[in-house]
Amino acid sequence: MIRNGRSPVEALKQEFRRRLEENRATLLRTLARTDEEAAASGSELRGFSEVAAEESERNLLTQLGGKERRELDDISDALARLETGTYGRCERCGHPMALARLRAVPAARYCLTCQQKQEATR
């Protein structure tokens, strides 16, 4: 069935492209805020205990930034898979992923079963 001139498959591709791009924009805004906060907190001179607390906060922000940067990479990879036609297939077993999984985690690389196996080996 074709609605609005688009096949259901094309409509899903556009839905996931939009969701992935929205997720990317949100992460980029978060990274920009995190970088601004780290730069602002580093420009003020304080006592030793305040500097230590500030350093701890910067380390946390850096770790969050690393996680978010990995998420950005995952989103870019998912967008590339959309373009090549491999989006929605598990990278481990090759089976199609459930639509509910993709809607919950649009940048997912693995089906739920393979994801659980991956996490169990960590």
Image (spheres, rainbow, N blue to C red):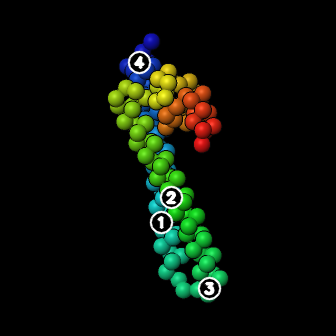
Q: Are marks 3 and 1 in contact (CB under 8 Å)?
A: no
Quarter of the C terminus within the rendering: top right
The kind of residue tagged 1 is Asp
Dot 2 falls on a residue whose secondary structure is helix
Rendering quarter of residue 41: bottom right
Find out whether the residues at labels 1 and 4 contact each other: C-beta distance under 8 Å: no
- The 10 Å Cα crowd at callout 3, few under 14, some 14 to 19, many 20 or more, is few
Residue 49 against residue 90 in the figure, above or below? below
Q: Indicate which label's residue lies in the foreground, 3 or 4.
A: 3
* Residue type marked 4: Ser
Residue at the extreme right of the image, as rendered: 49
**Up-down: is 42 above or below 108?**
below
Of badges 2 and 4, the one in the foreground is 2
Q: Reading the chain from its start, which is encountered first: label 2 or label 1?
A: 1
Report the residue at 59% width, 69% height from top. Answer: 57
Q: Mark 2, residues whose alpha carbon is within 10 Å: few (<14), some, or many (≥20)?
A: some
The residue that disc 3 covers is 48
Label 2 and label 1: CA atoms lie apart by 8 Å
Tag shown at residue 65: 2
Q: Which residue is mark 4?
A: 7
How many angstroms separate mark 1 from mark 4 (CA)? 42 Å
Viewer-nearest of discs 3 and 1: 3
The residue tagged 1 is 35
- Tell which of 7 and 34 is nearer to you: 34
Residue extending furthest toward the top: 1
